[in-house]
Image: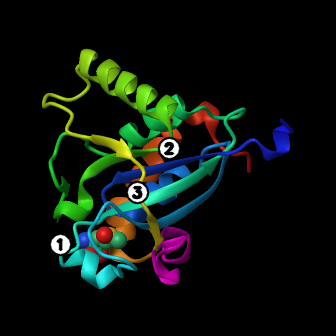
Amino acid sequence: MNTAQKRELATLGGGCFWCVEAALLQLAGVESVVSGYAGGKTQNPDYHSVCSGRTDHAEVVEVRFNPDVIDYRTLLLAFFAIHDPTTPNRQGNDIGSQYRSVIFTHGDEQEKIAGEVIAQLTAEKVWPNPIVTAVSPAPTFWRAEDYHQNYYANNPHQGYCMAVVAPKAAKLRKVFAGRLKEG
Ligand code: MHO
């Protein structure tokens, strides 16, 4: 296969998608991140309906990455570094099923790796409470509204961005210092 065409998708929910997008975009090998919704009951969900909790969609990001530069396992370790996988339907002050921790897998290999990474982090006792991250095959991904894309880059001074998104992005830069995009 032409390496220029070798790309993989990862679909991850770790709370507010502004955070996960801003953090993971910094990684070398991550070519694009799209914020959206997945795993719920309705077609074409919008932010308002997802926030109501009635659609059961999770806020997720769809990451397109080059596996020659960053493998899926490393991407998952980054994902786990920037959210708390032990709080059911909650990330910090954000409460609701749309904030659940979930890995939507694309294929058997991703499913296997997700299980291994969760087992590894459990064995390492990284968190005092059990990991509740759900792992299931990727359902339809619904792209979120345009204003949610690159939200942090476009709104760095917004209150939530300064209080919640920025520290997560900074944590990723610290923990994955050797794996960041240059410049
Ligand atoms: N509690 C935050 C979450 C934003 S995120 C896109 C807010 O309502 O601004 O869910």
Report ligand 1 position as a quadrant.
bottom left
Q: Quadrant of residue 50?
A: bottom left
- Assign a secondary structure to mark 3: loop
| Residue 131: mark in rendering | none
The kind of residue tagged 3 is Pro
Using the rendered image of the protein, determine whether residue 106 is visible from the camera's viewpoint. yes
- The relative height of residue 128 versus residue 150 in the rendered view (above or below) is above
Find residue 167 and report its horizontal and vertical position in percent: 39, 53
In front: label 1 or label 3: 3
Residue at image location 17% in from the left, 72% down from the top: 53
- Assign a secondary structure to mark 2: loop
Q: Quadrant of residue 136?
A: top left
Q: Are marks 2 and 3 in contact (CB under 8 Å)?
A: no
Find residue 126 and report its horizontal and vertical position in percent: 26, 25
Which comes sooner in the sequence, label 1 or label 3?
1
- The relative height of residue 6 versus residue 77 in the rendered view (above or below) is below
In front: label 1 or label 2: 2
Residue at image location 49% in from the left, 69% down from the top: 152
Find residue 142 and report its horizontal and vertical position in percent: 45, 70
Residue at image location 70% in from the left, 45% down from the top: 7
The answer to whether residue 84 is left or right of residue 181 is left
The magenta-colored residue range is 144-156
Instruction: Find disc 3 in the rendering and name its residue.
Output: 139
The answer to whether residue 119 is left or right of residue 65 is left
Which comes sooner in the sequence, label 2 or label 3?
2
Q: Quadrant of residue 3?
A: top right
Q: Are marks 1 and 3 in contact (CB under 8 Å)?
A: no
Using the rendered image of the protein, determine whether residue 175 is visible from the camera's viewpoint. no
| Residue 106: mark in rendering | 2
Instruction: Find disc 1 in the rendering and name its residue.
Output: 53
